[in-house]
Image: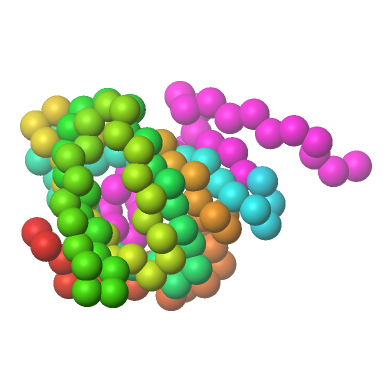
Amino acid sequence: MTERFTTGHLDRAPEVTAPDGSAVRPLCVLPGVASFAHFELAPGQTARAVSHATVEEIWFAISGAGEMWRRQDGYEEVTVLEPGTCLTIPLGTTFQFRAGREGLQVVAVTTPPWPTDSPNEARFESGRW
């Protein structure tokens, strides 16, 4: 019998480090469809700039503050991240984020599910910071 439902808890999820350097706590996965995770940067920390080969993301800031830089097809912008900010990272977007003095916590949906089996999923890029 296959598992019908998945339930995750932030306080029990193991922490892993994403290629960009952020702490990640995977929460739930819909196999082959999407995943949901908690990402965190320590106060003053800046993530490495990356782009994804197959993954798209939707982020929602839940605590702290920071900034997100995104670049795609010659266009770029910096968005202030604070509780309640929601943004997308479409496929192929180069992005980099940094935390303010309180740190930064976001939750995100990734499609397809993250992490992938591809060793080249996260590509290191030149960033803003």
Task: Determine if the magenta segment contains residue 27.
Answer: yes
Q: Position of residue 30 (x, y in %)?
A: 66, 46
Report the coloring of the rendering.
rainbow
Relative height, residue 48 to residue 74 (above, below): above
Image position of 35 (left or right of 65): right
Of residues 44 and 65, the one nearer the viewer is 65
Relative height, residue 96 to residue 27 (above, below): below
Quarter of the figure that contains the C terminus: bottom left
Q: Position of residue 87 (x, y in %)?
A: 35, 45
Q: Position of residue 5 (x, y in %)?
A: 74, 33
Image position of 63 (left or right of 29): left
Does residue 15 appear anywhere in the picture?
A: no
Image position of 17 (left or right of 26): left
Task: Determine if the magenta segment contains residue 94.
Answer: no
Provide the residue span drawn in magenta.
1-29
Does residue 40 appear anywhere in the picture?
A: yes
Q: Quadrant of residue 121?
A: bottom left
Tell me the residue at 30%/34% (across/down).
85
Image position of 10 (left or right of 88): right
Tell me the residue at 27%/27% (across/down).
83
Tell me the residue at 48%/62% (across/down).
55
Q: Position of residue 80 (x, y in %)?
A: 17, 40
| Dominant secondary structure (helix, strand or loop) of the stretch shown in magenta | loop
Q: Quadrant of residue 122?
A: bottom left
Of residues 125 and 18, the one nearer the viewer is 125
Tell me the residue at 22%/74% (across/down).
74
